[in-house]
């Protein structure tokens, strides 16, 4: 089983739609969870952290279910500028001495269509 | 103003050559990383350094040798390049681990697209 699994998509949605991405992780000891966004031929950038209580940032809502080892991202009122690949990211362990390893899913591609 | 910069942006070379990629961050972070993103867009950690000391080495062939002359720089030297080394290499940096609920964001450079012919 892969460490972090995502549906690769693509998800093609009209502007204004609500879209949800899911992700599962295999290591039950994983400590921290994130969604990163990667535009075409660009570097990944942090979109939001994911907390156990769930958290919201504008049109974006992230949820974590530790029991099911499942993370989700909901995007409401999709904009053309939301078109990107969304990467589910997990920190499986703290590597010590200040550094930590990000484990990435393969990403879910979103295209928002006018 | 660039937080994490890498040079070169593109690198095209022949099999068997040796090449280096440079990375610099001006964020004052103590930790730097190299990631590889293959043709299937899968991003995977290669190395991490904390205060110039190697912390993570994820079963990368020893043809890859990172070097950190100071906390702001982490360079990647690759010997005897192979076709399978073609990928985008991303440098990243972060502050020290802030705990499971802390701000543990990693900042990525723009990437170096390596093509081995």
Image (spheres, rainbow, N blue to C red):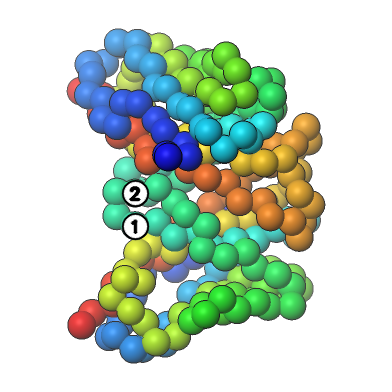
Alpha-carbon span between mark 1 and mark 2? 5 Å
The percent position of residue A84, horizontal first and vertical second, equals 35, 64
The percent position of residue B40, horizontal first and vertical second, equals 35, 48
Q: B91 or B42, which lies in front?
A: B91
Q: Residues within 10 Å of mark 1 (few under 14, many from 20)?
A: some
Location of mark 2 (residue)? A42
Q: Is residue B69 above or below residue B96?
A: above
Q: Is residue B27 visible?
A: yes
Label 1–label 2 contact, CB within 8 A: yes
Q: Is residue B36 visible?
A: no
At x 35%, y 26%, the residue is B7
Instruction: Determine which of the numbered discs, if any, sits on residue B106 in the image.
Output: none
Mark 2 chain: A
Q: Is residue A72 left or right of residue A69?
A: left
Q: Is residue B2 left or right of residue B10?
A: right
Write down the quadrant of residue B89 in the picture: top left
**Which image quarter holds the N terminus of chain A?**
bottom right
Q: Is residue A57 above or below residue A99?
A: below
At x 34%, y 33%, the residue is B112
The percent position of residue B6, horizontal first and vertical second, equals 39, 30
Location of mark 1 (residue)? A39
Query: In what element is the residue under mark 2?
Result: loop
Q: B2 or B91, which lies in front?
A: B2
Write down the quadrant of residue A24 in the picture: bottom right
**Which image quarter holds the C terminus of chain A?**
bottom left
At x 61%, y 71%, the residue is A71
Residue at mark 1 shares a chain with residue at mark 2:
yes
Mark 1 chain: A
Query: In what element is the residue under mark 1?
Result: loop
At x 39%, y 22%, the residue is B21
Q: Residues within 10 Å of mark 2 (few under 14, many from 20)?
A: few
């Amino acid at each position: 089983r892969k460490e972090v699994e995502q549906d690769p998509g693509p998800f093609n949605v009209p502007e204004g739609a609500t879209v949800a991405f899911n992700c599962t992780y295999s290591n039950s000891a994983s400590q921290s969870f994130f969604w990163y966004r990667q535009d075409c031929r660009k570097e990944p950038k942090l979109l939001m952290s994911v907390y156990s209580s769930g958290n919201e940032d504008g049109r974006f809502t992230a949820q974590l279910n530790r029991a099911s080892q499942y993370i989700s991202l909901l995007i409401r009122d999709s904009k053309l500028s939301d078109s990107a690949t969304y990467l589910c990211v997990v920190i499986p362990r703290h590597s010590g001495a200040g550094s930590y390893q990000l484990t990435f899913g393969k990403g879910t591609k979103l295209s928002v269509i006018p | 103003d660039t937080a994490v910069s890498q040079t070169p942006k593109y690198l095209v070379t022949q099999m068997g050559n040796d090449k280096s990629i440079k990375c610099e961050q001006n964020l004052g972070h103590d930790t730097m990383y190299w990631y590889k993103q293959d043709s299937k867009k899968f991003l995977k950690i290669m190395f991490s350094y904390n205060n110039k000391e190697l912390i993570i080495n994820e079963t990368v062939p020893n043809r890859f040798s990172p070097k950190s002359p100071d906390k702001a720089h982490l360079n990647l030297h690759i010997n005897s390049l192979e076709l399978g080394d073609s990928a985008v290499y991303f440098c990243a940096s972060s502050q020290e681990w802030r705990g499971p609920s802390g701000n543990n964001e990693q900042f990525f450079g723009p990437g170096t697209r390596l093509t081995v012919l």
